[in-house]
Image: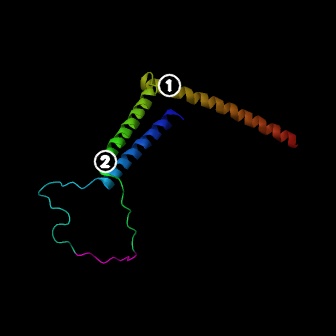
Amino acid sequence: MDAISQLQEKVNTIATIAFTTIGTLQRDAPPVRISPNYPESGSGPAPAAAPNPNPTPTPTPTPIADSDADFAKQPKLMSAELVKAAKQFDALVAALPLSEGGEEAQLKRIAQLEAENDAVGQQLEKQLEAAGSTKLSFRT
């Protein structure tokens, strides 16, 4: 696998870990009161519920049997995994070759490669023409 593909894979891993961590925290974190002046949810009169236009029963989610101790460990484990992936990404970036000579040298190298490509392309066309004329001479 080339370096760019490895970097892309590591970026995808970091994104997956980050989204999983945020989703887990949203799902499992206990509610925390923002301010003593902020009203609790459920306090005060509840608005009248609108009738359900789709009366089919929805399945109730199964309760998660994780204990508070497991929940306390989860963010630490997930953050350690995220840091590990970020360090691996940094190591991959550090292993990339540095560009030598700046932009001008890169443009010269690109021009050289394009010239080589054109030369090889012309050789290939000549070989194809020769193969085509040989094929035609066998048919006649």
* Secondary-structure class at tag 1: helix
Residue at the image point whose x is 33% and y is 76% from the top: 52
Residue closer to the observer: 37 or 136:
37
Q: Quadrant of the N terminus?
A: top right
Q: For label 2, count other residues whose C-alpha is less than 10 Å away and answer few (under 14), some (14-19) or many (20+).
A: few
* Secondary-structure class at tag 2: helix
Residue at the image point whose x is 40% and y is 37% from the top: 85
Give the residue at mark 2. Answer: 69
Q: Which mark is residue 80?
A: none
Counting residues from the start of the chain, the first of labels 2 and 1 encountered is 2
Residue projecting furthest to the top:
101
Question: Which numbered mark, 2 or 1, is in the foreground of this view?
Answer: 2
Q: Is residue 84 above or below residue 34?
A: above
- What colour scheme was applied to this rendering of the protein? rainbow
Q: Which residues are magenta?
A: 48-56
Q: Picture coordinates of residue 90 (x, y %)?
A: 40, 32
Give the residue at mark 1. Answer: 108
Residue closer to the observer: 134 or 99:
99
Q: Quadrant of the C terminus?
A: top right
The image quadrant that residue 28 belongs to is bottom left
**Marks 2,1: beta carbons within 8 A:** no
Q: Picture coordinates of residue 97 (x, y %)?
A: 46, 25
